[in-house]
Amino acid sequence: MLRLELTGIRKEYPGVCANDDVSLAVAPGEIHAVLGENGAGKSTLMRIIYGAARPDAGSICWNGNPVTIATPEVARSLGIAMVFQHFSLFETLSVAENIWLGQRGSERLTDLTARIQTASKTYGLELDPERPVHTLSVGERQRVEIVRALLTQPQLLILDEPTSVLTPQAVQKLFATLRDLAKTGCSILYISHKLDEIRQLCTRCTVLRGGRVTGVLDPRGETERTLSRLMIGSEPPAIERATAALGEAALVVARLGVKPNAPFGTELTNLSFTLRAGEILGVAGVSGNGQKELLEALSGENPATHTGAIELLGREVTRCLPAARRQLGLHYVPEERLGRAAAPSLSLAQNTLLTRREPVGRAGWIDRTRLSRLAERVVARFQVKAPSVDAPATSLSGGNLQKFIVGREIDAKPKVLIVAQPTWGVDVGAAAQIRAHLLELKRNGSAVLLVSEDLDELLQVCDSLVVMARGRLSPRVSVGAITLEQIGEWMSGLWPAEAVEAQVA
């Protein structure tokens, strides 16, 4: 008997058919992948399974019985848990309070807090149950969502990009946990754009393209190229990384210290590095180790503890506001898509104005024609799937919104680009496209600081990298002179002390 069986699922939205005659079968104890490019219909299908959307046609069977999953509450009562790519957490509540709200029954908060501490250690997903959610980084919030789902002991667990913020060691620990869950009979639907993970973890996968199923197969017998062809109709373009032709220092950070804005933030102490024109410097590390504070200091959102700590294109900018830095040529892509990088209810054209001022005249009037053309150029250049530039940001899939946000900043031809998690949640084709654009910026003389928890991405596009742990930076090292295992060790702060002393001196 199958745990879940979908037959002939169809779901239409104005101007688009998200799912067209989709069928999916998942057995008890099976780890089943759902693959597809951004906009292929994966998220819509998962929302239907979880009761967050109603299909226009088709049927759903659960443990052999026909069911109507009208709401997420119904899904949870059946034993379905889901970790969304876009989080559903209350900012003003603590980690424990957020998880407590999603639990069935009358468990006391103190008892749940103890369970959270035990589970987070067991699964290798470190959490402080007392921390308010608004003080957490994106990666830490994802850990909350995963632990909350695991604590429900589900019969079916849906995971959307669960490893994007984990170290290689933590990924393997999570995989071991998922395999143990599967042995108990729990079925797992696993969505990821990391094809190597799919081939390593999953025993079967359903591939979607354009809302339709293009294949159901065992990924262990496939290559990343064959899976890519099923997903996007072609193999992803090859990435060509040219040798860096270094220019003048574009961004100089000298003994930077930052007090965190939030009570549970990470204090930065004595950070120093130089980013030159024509190079890409990567910053690796587990989310929550000071990346957020570093990005806020560099973008101008949170001032450093002393002047003289940040120099941009020969100008001292430690106390300058974000707008002044942008005028000098610095552009920034934050890791939070909705709420910071984009206003959810505003259109794509209106969101362009958040960082691009070309359509604004001297008197403050907005040239709407020029604004639309600018947004349309970004949409076309970065192949963003959207009904029009008048569509609200929240209507796009996570990957397509990410392409628009990254494209908006790259299209501005920045002299210095600071970008965090540029390919989080985007398909292999889009990820290759974004990385190619970053390399093109570098060839054109721009300086790029890339903060990412995707180690393959860092090794693919960066010239050198540093690792961030507990508010400190490791020695700078060429990407050809370090292994994944070493990076994983350095993520725990275990780098040679003598190298750090030499770097500071």
Image: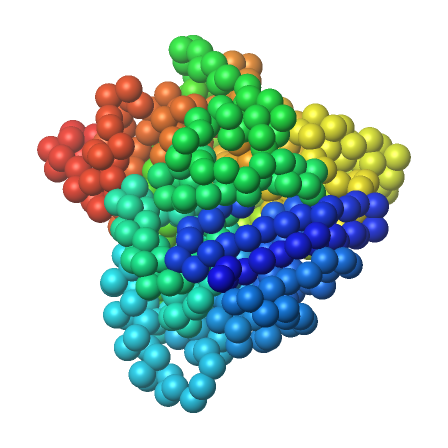
Residue furthest left in the image: 498
Q: Residue at x 31, y 83 (%)?
A: 111
Residue 405, can we see it? no
Residue 485 horizontal/vertical position (percent): 22, 34
Closer to us: 83 or 19:
19
Residue 394 horizontal/vertical position (percent): 69, 53
Q: Is residue 162 left or right of residue 76?
A: left
Quadrant of the drawing holding the C terminus: top left
Residue 113 horizontal/vertical position (percent): 33, 77
Residue 117, can we see it? yes
Q: Is residue 449 left or right of residue 500?
A: right
Q: Is residue 139 above or below residue 370?
A: below
Q: Residue at x 62, y 56 (%)?
A: 6
Q: Is residue 292 above or below residue 418?
A: below
Q: Residue at x 78, y 52 (%)?
A: 12
Residue 123 horizontal/vertical position (percent): 29, 59
Q: Is residue 242 left or right of residue 40?
A: left
Numbered circles on residues, count: 0
Closer to us: 353 or 141:
141
Q: Residue at x 32, y 71 (%)?
A: 116
Residue furthest front in the image: 1
Type of colouring:
rainbow
Closer to us: 120 or 9:
9
Closer to us: 366 or 434:
434
Q: Is residue 111 above or below residue 425?
A: below
Q: Is residue 63 left or right of residue 132?
A: right
